Each structure stands twice: as structure tokens, then as C-alpha cells.
Image: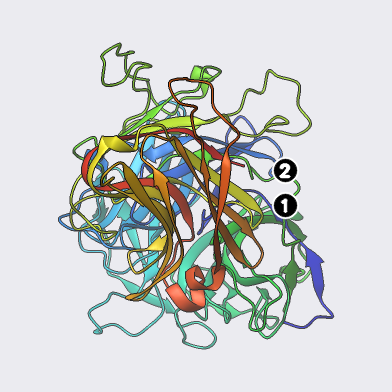
């Protein structure tokens, strides 16, 4: 935790993909899965051949029946998965905090995952699986929420195919500080059992620790060099590092992933993109401990295009059970990259190009890699989408269903735009684009339903009940409107591009740009907005009508 022990870490995905878990594939290469909280589809699955370059291949939770809840709030839902392979099957254990702990399985992660196997009698969050050499499977996790158990890590034997806990829960570790020990993983290396866990909370005091024992249930010897890694008490760009998982644990050189947040150079530093996964390699000493002690890691504030910065994956907060959100594929869509089978094309008047992604299936728009490229996503970034939203009377809470559809913000410097050609589609209410942290903290550039042929367009910031309008302009309802949020390391510039038409013609005049002001990004930051996710950039319509957004672009 000193500035004298800092090295660079490689970010392997951008945007809020926290709590990374990795697993070696038997044929070589790796898989990674992340927490998804209230967002659906959930449990994003990544694949890599070298542990450094990763691509999103789908979602383990892409069917509504896999995501069971009676009600949903921000930063609820799916917490801290662990992925392991055993005897031909991938096991993905995870907490649904609205229901309980569950296991999903598959033999082929490209072909979809099972319905949940619920783990009865196992409280707490952040469950993990470990398969011993004799085939015995163990589950570990932290204390339950009832307050009856002392804080720490608990272990028991389990039948993972039935979700049956087979032995008593045993407290095996209380951590080094007693502050939020969580995210445990159990490994075996050269006859010894190694327990790794996060501690200190997933904010500025976050850290990762390790202990070892000759038996799964202990007693465990603490590593004298704990914490293995932490960025606490530093002013580095990368903060809140921890929640690690490892591959090649038996080897002299081990691959480790962890998450952290990028923060700007304000004082105090601010970050609102979310917790992102990083990868490093470390070596082991002859004493059987890792060559890591108080290790700090850093990263540049902005990416170089190698960490899926241009990935666009459409998600909603909660399940869109009423199919109110429809994403149309761009013409160069790579269908072979779909997470699940695409629905048939529909030539109906309501969706002339055919709906390609409903909320319960693939919502990933990829760039055309076949084109000439100056980076992994092509020179122009992801292709634009067309999204139709059936508006209902709601706000940005999740009580009436998902309030918006969007994609994760992956860089501070970015631009999110959407065009509405016919504002008359909105009969009442408002529609527009949003930078969304949660129901109490978000930024909008939106138009209100037209009155007397005129639309009012506003840029607003919502901060824990305080609503501030930073810019307002009137535009003719007959004019197509492009709504713009342009991000940088300090926040967002809001604007409207109005596309006037000459009388009686269809050839557009020069567009008129209306500056609607700037909004500080710290409104969405962890220190202000709280929560466990990050910023979603998306489109919404609240009120009545079916609003179609064209040229929805994230760049």
C-alpha cells in the first residue's frame, strides 16, 4: 500500500464488470464471468486464449426463468460468481440476493447454461466451489445476514449437482482485520490448501489476503505478507483493488484477476465507470507463499482500445417481462457472435427491420471485424443501433419495470447519441438519453411531449432527490432531434442537434447545435451515488407512446 511498490496492471474488460472469476478450459485458454447485479441479461461470460485479450461470448443468465425475484432494486440481484470446471462440466455458483445461492451448469459455455440449482441451507453471499483431488466438492462463503454468525469465511462439503450441503458449516477464517471478509476462493497447491479472500469493503480500503493449511477445514496459517495487494492510502488512478481469482495455481507463475476502479485527478478523486477486471501474473517463492506483499497496481485513466472499450451490450435494470425494449440489428451484424439464437425477422409495420434482440435474448451489437481495422473493434467503433421503447408512466425506479435500456460506459472520454425522427411518437411524458447510476442519481438529455408543435428539451441532473435543470431549449416538433451526452474526465457536456427541414422539402438544412451545459460526473461517482455497479448510457421513454431512437451510438 505504498507508492514504492507499484506496477502496471492490464485491464481486460471495460465498464462495470466487477467480481471477476476465471477458470482454465480443459482444451486451453480461459473463461471469465462477472457480477451483474440488477441487470439483465446477466452473468457476462468472456473467453481468452492468453489471459490478456478477452471477448464477450454471451451471458450465463439470458432467460427470465434463471433470474428469479419478486421485487428488484439497484445493486440487488446477482453477486460475486465463482466458475470452476470439473469432470466435463462447468459449475457457476453465485448469489441472487433476492432469492438465495444458486448453481448454473453447462458442458459448453457457448451453448447456454442450465436453470438454477438452488443451494438450500447456505446463507451469506459470494459462494465459491472447490473440487478436491478425491472428487469431494466444497462450498465456501461468508457469514449470513442474520447477525447470528461471527464475520468470516465458512466451509462445508456440498453435492453441487443437487445443491445439497453435506456437512456442517465451519468457520475457517476471520480475516486479518475482521472488516467484511468476503469473496473467498479455495485452491490446492502442491498438497497445501490455500484460501484467498477480499477484505476491507469494496471501496478505498479494499485488499486481498491469503492463508494456507494442510487440511480444507484448517487450521489456517496467515501469510506474513498480508495483504497480498491493496491500493489503500494511495493517490493512484486505480483504486479499490481486490476480489481476486487465480488460474495455474499449481505452477510457478500464476494468473490472477481482480477488480478496481479508475478515478480522475480531482481532489478527492472521483470515478463513476464502475469496478472493472484486471489481470496480472505473479510468481511463488520457495517458502510456498506468493511473491506479493502490499502490492499496488496502477493503470492509465483512459484505455488504448485493447480492453473491449468499444463493446456495446444492451442490458436493462431488471427483466423486461413486457418486451418494451427492442433493439434492431445494424446491417453488418455478425450473427455468429450472438449469445443465443436470434428470433426470426419480422416485417411488420411496427418493426420494419425486424426485432433482433428482445430483453431475454442477445443484445450485443458488435463492430464489423471483417472491415479494415486500426484496433480490435474497427476504425469507427460499434455500429449504431435502432431501439424502440414502449413508454409507460414510470420514473427511474425499478418498481414498474426497467426504466431504460443501455450499455456500460467504458471510458471517461466518450460520446453517446440517439436521434428521434418523430417526436410526435411520444403522446405524453418525456423521452431521451441518460447516464444512469441508479434510480436516485442520473443525468438526462430529454424532450417532453410536444405542445402546439413545439418540444421542450432539457438537460437535467438528479442527485438524491435534488433536480437541477442545467439547460433548456425549445425545438420544433417536426424536426428530427439528436440528443448528445459527451463525456470526459470531469463529467458530461449535454447538447441537442436540431435537424431542420426546408418548407415542403425533405433535404435537411444545416443542423443547429444547442449547448445545454455541463454536469459534473461526481454526481454518479461511488462516493456520491453509492452502489456496486457503474454508469449505464441508455435511452428511455416515460409516459405514453412508442418512441423509436435511431443511430443510437456509443463511441
- Residue placed under numbered mark 1 in the picture: 303
Q: Which labelled disc corresponds to residue 67?
A: none
- Answer with the quarter of the image where residue 462 lies: bottom left
Q: Secondary structure at mark 2?
A: loop
Quadrant in the rendering for residue 234: bottom right
Examine the rendered structure and indicate whether residue 231 appears above or below residue 81.
below
Q: Residue at x 31, y 57 (%)?
A: 77
Left or right: 313 with respect to 289? left
Gap in Å between the C-alphas at discs 2 and 1?
A: 7 Å
Residue assigned mark 2? 306
How is the model colour-coded?
Answer: rainbow
Q: Position of residue 543 (x, y in %)?
A: 21, 48
* Residue placed most toward the observer, 413 or 40: 413
Quarter in which the C terminus is drawn: top right
Residue found farthest to the front: 503
**C-beta proximity under 8 Å, tags 2 and 1:** yes
Quadrant where the N terminus lies?
bottom right
Amino acid at each position: 500500500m505504498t507508492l514504492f511498490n507499484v506496477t502496471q496492471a492490464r485491464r481486460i474488460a471495460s465498464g462495470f464488470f466487477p467480481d471477476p472469476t476465471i477458470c482454465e478450459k480443459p482444451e486451453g485458454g480461459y473463461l471469465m464471468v462477472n457480477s451483474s447485479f440488477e441487470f439483465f441479461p446477466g452473468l457476462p461470460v468472456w473467453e481468452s486464449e492468453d489471459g490478456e485479450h478477452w471477448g464477450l461470448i454471451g451471458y450465463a443468465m439470458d432467460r427470465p426463468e434463471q433470474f428469479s425475484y419478486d421485487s428488484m432494486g439497484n445493486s440487488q440481484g446477482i453477486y460475486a460468481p465463482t466458475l470452476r470446471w470439473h469432470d466435463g462440466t462447468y459449475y457457476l455458483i453465485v448469489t441472487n440476493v433476492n432469492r438465495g445461492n444458486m448453481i448454473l451448469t453447462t458442458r459448453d459455455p457457448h451453448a447456454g447454461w442450465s436453470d438454477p440449482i438452488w443451494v438450500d441451507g447456505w446463507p451469506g453471499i459470494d459462494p465459491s466451489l472447490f473440487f478436491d483431488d478425491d472428487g469431494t466438492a466444497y462450498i465456501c462463503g461468508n457469514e449470513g445476514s442474520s447477525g447470528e454468525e461471527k464475520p468470516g469465511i465458512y466451509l462445508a462439503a456440498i453435492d453441487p449437482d443437487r445443491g445439497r450441503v453435506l456437512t456442517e458449516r465451519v468457520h475457517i477464517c476471520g480475516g486479518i482485520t475482521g472488516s467484511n471478509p468476503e469473496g473467498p476462493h479455495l485452491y490446492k497447491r502442491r498438497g497445501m490448501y490455500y484460501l484467498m479472500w477480499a477484505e476491507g469493503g469494496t471501496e478505498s480500503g479494499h485488499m486481498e489476503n491469503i492463508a494456507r493449511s494442510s487440511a480444507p477445514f484448517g487450521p489456517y496459517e496467515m501469510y506474513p505478507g498480508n495483504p497480498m495487494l491493496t491500493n489503500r492510502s494511495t493517490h493512484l488512478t486505480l483504486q479499490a483493488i481486490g476480489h481476486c481469482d487465480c488460474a495455474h495455481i499449481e505452477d510457478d507463475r500464476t494468473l490472477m484477476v481482480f477488480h478496481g476502479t479508475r478515478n480522475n485527478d480531482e481532489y478527492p478523486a472521483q470515478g463513476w465507470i464502475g469496478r472493472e477486471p484486471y489481470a496480472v501474473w505473479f510468481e511463488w517463492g520457495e517458502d510456498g507463499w506468493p511473491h506479493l506483499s502490499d502490492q499496488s497496481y496502477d493503470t492509465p485513466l483512459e484505455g488504448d482500445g485493447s480492453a473491449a472499450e468499444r463493446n456495446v451490450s444492451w442490458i436493462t435494470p431488471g427483466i423486461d417481462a413486457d418486451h418494451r425494449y427492442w433493439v434492431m440489428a445494424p446491417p453488418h451484424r455478425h450473427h455468429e457472435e450472438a449469445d443465443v439464437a436470434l428470433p426470426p425477422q419480422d416485417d411488420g409495420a411496427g418493426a420494419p427491420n425486424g426485432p433482433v434482440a428482445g430483453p431475454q435474448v442477445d443484445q450485443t451489437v458488435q463492430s464489423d471485424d471483417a472491415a479494415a481495422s486500426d484496433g480490435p473493434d474497427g476504425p469507427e467503433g460499434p455500429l449504431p443501433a435502432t431501439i424502440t421503447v414502449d413508454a409507460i408512466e414510470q420514473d427511474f425506479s425499478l418498481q414498474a419495470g426497467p426504466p431504460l435500456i443501455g450499455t456500460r460506459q467504458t471510458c471517461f472520454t466518450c460520446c453517446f447519441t440517439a436521434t428521434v425522427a418523430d417526436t410526435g411518437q411520444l403522446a405524453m411524458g418525456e423521452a431521451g438519453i441518460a447516464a444512469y447510476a441508479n434510480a436516485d442519481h442520473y443525468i438526462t438529455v430529454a424532450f417532453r411531449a410536444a405542445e402546439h408543435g413545439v418540444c421542450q428539451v432539457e438537460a437535467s441532473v438528479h442527485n438524491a432527490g435534488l433536480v437541477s435543470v442545467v439547460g433548456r431549449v425549445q425545438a420544433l416538433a417536426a424536426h428530427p432531434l439528436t440528443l448528445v451526452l459527451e463525456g470526459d474526465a470531469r463529467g458530461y457536456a449535454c447538447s441537442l442537434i436540431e435537424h431542420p427541414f426546408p418548407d415542403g422539402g425533405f433535404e435537411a438544412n444545416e443542423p443547429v447545435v444547442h449547448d445545454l451545459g455541463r454536469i459534473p460526473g461526481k454526481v454518479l461517482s461511488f462516493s456520491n451515488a453509492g452502489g456496486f455497479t457503474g454508469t449505464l448510457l441508455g435511452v428511455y421513454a416515460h409516459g405514453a407512446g412508442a418512441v423509436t431512437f435511431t443511430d443510437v451510438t456509443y463511441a
